[in-house]
Amino acid sequence: MARSLAVEWLGRVSYAEALRRQAARLAEVRAGAAGDVLLLLEHPSVVTLGRGARPENLLESPEALRARGIDVHEVARGGDVTWHGPGQLVGYAIVDLDARGRRDVHRFLRDLEGGLVDALEKLGLAADVRPGMTGVFVAGSEPPRKIASIGVGVRGWVTWHGFALNVEPDLSDGFGAIVPCGLRGVEMTSLARELGTAAPVDLAERAREAVAEAFRRRFA
């Protein structure tokens, strides 16, 4: 039986509250009481450390970060260290891979990347992926300019966590305190920066709509 993907916009949600909501929905999906969902939201400024995080990629201490209003969380997702904050579109995909007949986490990661590439194309920006580097980059950029980061977790073949797309954040706010995703020599960028004067005033809303449409289509 085919599965669809619902998309819900939650607005600005604290990282702790988003974790609680993800865990609740994940339990419902695993129990067969709810369908797959993509939760779209924005976080207050926060640095998260995935299972593969290395201490040297955190350039300020957790205490120093918290002193200037940036929360810090260790989380059960793949990947290294990243930052979330205002102006960034975060997507948490809670998808039952077993029910979809796709017990393949690597394929799921490629689907996340593909959905973001599709959405960015709709928004007027060509994007691509790079071998050995999970995430989405500005097409052909050298050195690479990264516009979206991805890190997922899996429980009983149901995914959680997901991606962060830089729409119009202050890139110096949190990324300056970390080595994003542990990738040295990679510059973080945003949709607003890349589009420049061509960026519409309602860019955040258009980005949400483009991402929702692209993911509904890819996970139909």
Image (cartoon, rainbow, N blue to C red):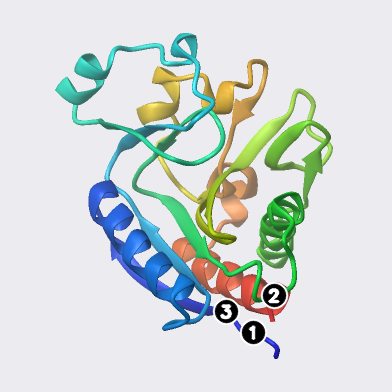
For mark 1, give the secondary structure: loop
Whole-percent x, y for residue 130 in the image: 80, 36
**Horizontally, is 86 left or right of 193 in the view?**
left
> Alpha-carbon distance for marks 1 and 2?
7 Å
Instruction: Please report contact status of discs 1 and 2: CB closer than 8 Å, yes or no.
Output: yes
Q: Is 110 drawn above or below residue 4 in the view shown?
A: above
Residue of label 3:
5
- As shown in the figure, which amino acid type bears the numbered disc 2? Arg
- As shown in the figure, which amino acid type bears the numbered disc 3? Leu
> Alpha-carbon distance for marks 3 and 1?
7 Å
* Crowd band around label 3 with a 10 angstrom C-alpha radius: few (<14), some (14–19), many (20+): some
Of the numbered discs in the image, which one, if any, rests on residue 3? 1
Instruction: Please report contact status of discs 3 and 1: CB closer than 8 Å, yes or no.
Output: yes
Q: Residue at x 44, y 82 (%)?
A: 34
Residue of label 2:
100
* Crowd band around label 2 with a 10 angstrom C-alpha radius: few (<14), some (14–19), many (20+): few
Q: Is 31 drawn above or below residue 81 in the view shown?
A: below
Furthest-left residue in view?
67
